[in-house]
Image: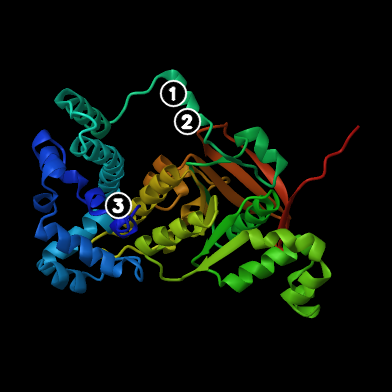
Amino acid sequence: MVKLLELADMTQKALLGRATQDLKFFKLYLYDKEKFFSIENKKIFQAIKKQADTRDTLDIAEFAVDTNMSFKDAVEFQFLYTQSSVEAQLALERLKKIYVKYRVFSILDELKKDFERGNVDIDSDAIQKILNELQDLQAGKWMKATEVEQTIKNEKFFFSKFREAKDLFFAYRSGDLHVIAARPGVGKTTFLLNEAESLAKQGHKVGFVTLEMPAYQCVNRVIANVCNVTMHELRAQGGVHAVIAKNADKTSHINNIMFFEDYSVDINTLVASIRRAVAAGVDVIFIDQISHIRHTDKAYSKADAVERTVRTLRSLALELNICIIAANQISRAALQTEEPQLEHLKESGALEEASQLVLMLQQKENELVVYVRKATHGRLGKFSVIALYERAQFVSAPTIDF
């Protein structure tokens, strides 16, 4: 969710563009900017700018003092523009449109300057036409089939480490939320790390959010997997740095993985962190795991909090055109059945609806069985990979040519 803070470096007219929805406000903007930039709006802009360089979210008490708002109004203001939620997504869309309007008004500024120099006459019909276009932007745009086809070119594919996956869902995709679910101890984190390392090797820049396991343990598992050593051998050979030095040719790509470690992160902080990672070039995000993400509003039940988190992550994937792969737990009810099903997902309603791919993992002796329980861009099925837990490694079974 784009926070208002991230828009604070725009000019005042970008922030205040929401006041230019009709001809009256447009004329006021064009001919009398002093009235347009009211004292109240200046205070809001300046209060935001004051905090923008040092903080990800507003300090409500300070913001309330600077703007002469009541504390209650200041809290509501923050909710509308910084809370990652379904309601705030609407605010995001408004802010996007404000920026589009800002660019249009910049062009009109140039027209006004030309008019003042006597170069051109301002055509009221032309102005009205632009205003109508702004109204169309606000209402949304219908696209021709050929225009829709152009948007498909922005889609990116992220291929799984396991060749069996390609036959079922082809690849993970940008703009989608993917869920990897399993009971505790089955290997969710190791599975995510294997996929993250494989994507890094393919040249992608990967962000790995660990909310359960220390980041250094995640790195140990990645190194054990890449260098094909056991966790015991990793320690016996002098630790991660020594093993990396011995296997420099194998480990050069692991710096494509960036780790974010926080055991009590809230959804707003996480979204801000993901935005910073994407700005740094990251195009796929792994999250281990969804249920550990907190919501600042204590009024939400656990199920509501997870639902809002899932929908926020889905919206973020669409907006930034990134791939998000997140882990989640399976309920104990799965122990009573032979194979895990979608209904065994914790808070399954939201996860089922918002995700485009759901993989459910089950351990069977020396194998990990991967069930594809939802695949919007593929088909349902299952495949098995060899589990080498002591090496933090899952590998496809070798092919046999006859």
Residue at image point 36% right, 47% down: 311
Residue type beneath disc 3: Ser
**In front here: 209 or 291?**
209
Residue contact at pointers 2 and 3, CB within 8 angstroms: no
> Marks 2/3: CA distance?
25 Å
**Front tag of 2 and 3:** 2
Where does label 1 land, which residue?
147
In the rendered view, would you say 165 is above or below 63? above
The tag on residue 151 is: 2
Secondary structure at numbered mark 2: helix
Give the mark toward the camera: 3 or 1: 1
> x%, y% of residue 395?
74, 51
Point out the tag, 2 or 3, that comes first from the N-terminus. Answer: 3
Left or right: residue 57 compared with residue 251: left
Residue 275 against residue 168 in the figure, above or below: below
Judged left or right of residue 138, residue 204 is right
Is any atom of residue 228 visible in this view?
no
Q: Say if mark 2 contacts mark 1, CB within 8 Å.
A: yes
The residue lying toward the viewer, choosing from 233 and 185, is 233
Tell me residue 352's x, y (percent): 43, 42
